[in-house]
Amino acid sequence: MVETFVKSVMASTACFVIVSRNDIPIYEAEVGSALKKEEAAHQHQFILHAALDIVQDLAWTTSAMFLKAMDRFSDLVVSVYVTAGHTRLMLLHDSRNEDGIKSFFQEVHELYIKRQHIYDLFSKQLVEMNRSICMVDQLVELHPYSGSSPPPIGMVDALLVYHNLCNVFMLYFHK
Amino acid sequence: MIGVGKVKQYTNVLDKPLSKGKQEVSLSAFAFLFSELVQYNQTQVDNIAELERRLEDAGYGVGVRVLELLCHRDKGNRRETRLLGILSFVHSTVWKVLFGKVADSLEKGTEHEDEYMISEKELLVNRFISIPKDMGTFNCGAFVAGIVRGVLDSAGFPATVSAHFVPMEGQQRPRTTILIKFAEEVLTREARLG
């Protein structure tokens, strides 16, 4: 699936967040020059968080899933893709290639549908443990299991999801 | 020897492409599984209300996933933003995929603005179930009510959904009605959107 898309999108920085229906971030990934600067990463998260309100209003005016560039901040653009269950795939980037972004979102959407049970599992865990932002690999660390016994199936699947998401992400934004 | 094209074997069912997979499951297998589900829950609870709630919760998870899958597969990635849109989506598309036919009827409630009813002559899940007299108004259609609630809830139309038997003259078995009562915010948003 991933190998069929070859062309990359030519963006230098990108921050990708998956936010669930109840406004809980499920997944987060940062790529590009922001990796070096701590504050830039925080700023990206803040921009995406602020864009949530706009997405909320915009989502009810159209029946399309891909909302194009709906917010700007200096030279960065926020693009959002809303799924049927109101899960928001939000991307902060500085690329102008809309078709590439759209196909990226569609791929992630397909991956999300196939692994929905994993994301539901994590949403519930996030609510119960009262944490606001987690990365998938941090959650994997938190889950208590002794090293001797094999990890439960859910965790293996979660690692596969993470791996797949990283691959898709890197393929699109790796320069 | 007839040459057969090589069919790619997917080791993981999750790796199969989403567009395929309209598969049929044997009715008896489903009836068996559903009866086991009801029986298991019966041993866990003390009263009927709790049993209904558990069946509903079981259906809720199905509803959430079915919405995502169907919107992607059958509707070409168009979301539903209007009340009538999502109701007809449930009434035709969801019913067709889950039960093989569209629901019998979709009606708007006469007394209250926020009530809608989907009726079915014989719900598939109730086909092989008989309710003993001492269980009163219990309806295993609570599972289907949970599915509908899951679909509506995750699409952004919170509602309380329940299943009721409606006796019909001239027919032996009563008709089953799924009653949908939308929350306040849904109506205000509908009014705002015009």
Image (spheres, coloured by chain):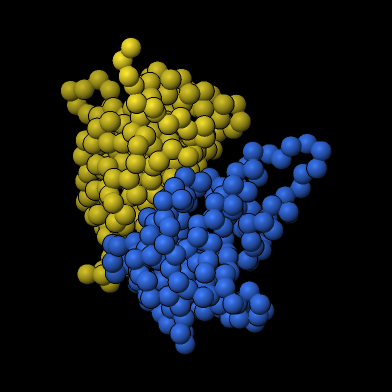
Q: Which lettered chain is shown in blue?
A: A
Quadrant assignment for the N terminus of chain B: top left
Please indicate whether residue A5 sits to the left or right of residue B175 in the image. Answer: right
Residue A11 vs residue A79, the one in the foreground? A11
Q: Residue at x 22, y 44 (%)?
A: B106
Whole-percent x, y for residue A121 in the image:
59, 48
**Left or right: A99 as drawn, with respect to B191:** right
Asked if residue B92 can be seen in this view, the reply is yes
Comparing A115 with A126, the one in front is A115
* Picture quadrant where residue B66 is located: top left
Colour assigned to chain B in the rendering is yellow
Residue in the foreground of this view, choosing between B71 and B135 = B71
Q: In this rendering, is residue B192 above or below B2?
A: below
Q: Is residue B75 above or below residue A18?
A: above
Q: Position of residue A139 (x, y in %)?
A: 68, 55
Note whether residue B42 is visible.
no
Q: Residue furthest top?
A: B1
Which percent across, then down, holds residue B60?
46, 44
